[in-house]
Amino acid sequence: MTKPTPFKVGEAYDTFADLLDHLMGVNLHHGYWADDTSDESFDVATTRLTDKLAGLLTIRPGDRLLDIGCGVGEPAIRLASAHDIEGVGISIAPGQVERANDRAAAAGLADRLSFQFADAMDLPFPDESFDLVWALESLHHMPDRWQVVREAARVLRPGGRMAIGDFSLRSVDGKPADASSCDLVRMGALKLLEVDDYQSNLRAAGLVPEAAEDVSDRTRPSWGKAAERFEAARELAEQHIGAEQFEVTLSRFRQFSAELQFEVTLSRFRQFSAEPSVGYVLLTARKPD
Ligand code: SAH
């Protein structure tokens, strides 16, 4: 299977924006749930994951942030609202960039937060121009995560920090890490990495790994909950976008999946929640002074 190009990934996010809004809300990442049976809303749980990752950083007033893979801007808007910082977010999906800018303006942050179209593999920013580089659930899309980490290291100022939230591969109860029970991992659609691999590549890029928090047990319910929401969406579609429009979206989704040579199905989503080797890690690393 060939990995989709960045532009194809961006096109997918824009094409399925309605569906994603409905399934995920404005945070396009996993939730950090209070417990396995939590009936908290997606917004509460996904916002908590943003706050968890932010809590691993030292954020000072006036810091300049780069959000790599900004979605519709919510994590950066939250960071800029909570801290007196400025920044820029990038996405490979033009529709997201437009929405993120509108949302920042609506939040009264347009003077210090902006979003632009760019490919993380080749950042259009000068060396040493950011204090914080943030990549929450975006690196797994990149053709080469380490190229993006090297780019992040280049644009960080000495003393600046990178924060990452990503899926991971982990060994549980002393058993070897193996996620081949998940079709999408076996087919290469989702590449999972062990934390050690992350840390050695952060070091190779000139960064010093700091925090590494395995949050798998708290994020895992997200897969099943997203699948449940998808099932419920069919009924709700009548009220929101109309059953006919929902079918149109679904058939486009199927066509798109076929083009990318993998099909995201509900059962495949559930495989992730059933496989303990599929984890989620929050990482930070510092660029030496
Ligand atoms: N961090 C956001 C969005 C996560 S979804 C949030 O937590 O809400 C993944 C994001 O990565 C999308 O915005 C997608 O457009 C972006 N992305 C994927 N590949 C990219 C690339 N090569 N360059 C820039 N952004 C990319």
Image (cartoon, grey):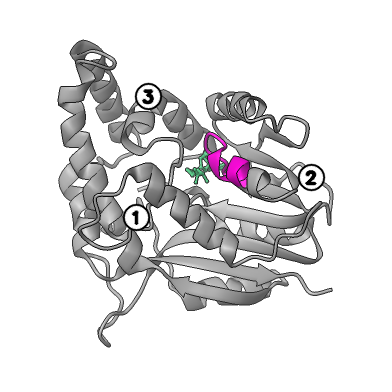
Disc 1 marks which amino acid? Gly
When asked about the image quadrant of residue 123, the answer is top right
Label 2 or label 3, whichever lies nearer to me, is 3
Amino acid at dot 3: Asp
Is 251 placed above or below 92 here?
above
Q: Position of residue 26 (x, y in %)?
A: 45, 36
- Asked if residue 189 shows in the view, the reply is yes
Is the CB atom of the residue marked by disc 1 within 8 angstroms of ligand 1's nearest atom? Answer: no
Q: Which residue is denoted by mark 1 in the rendering?
A: 188
**Which of the marked residues, 2 or 3, is nearer the chain's N terminus?**
3
Do the residues bearing badges 3 and 1 touch, measured as CB atoms within 8 Å? Answer: no
Label 3 SS? helix
State left or right for residue 147 relative to residue 254: right
Circle 3 residues within 10 Å: few <14, some 14–19, many ≥20: some
**Which of pointers 2 and 1 lies earlier in the amino acid sequence?**
2
* Image spot of residue 194 (x, y percent): 43, 73
Question: Which residue type carries mark 2?
Answer: Phe
Question: How many angstroms separate mark 2 from mark 3 (CA)?
Answer: 31 Å
Query: Mark 1 and mark 2 in contact (Cβ < 8 Å)?
Result: no
User: What residue is disc 3 on?
Assistant: 18
Nearest to the eye among marks 2 and 1: give it: 2
Specify start and end residues of the magenta stretch as a single range: 68-78
The quadrant in which the C terminus is found is bottom right
Query: Which residue corresponds to mark 2?
Result: 125
Residue 285: quadrant of the picture: bottom right
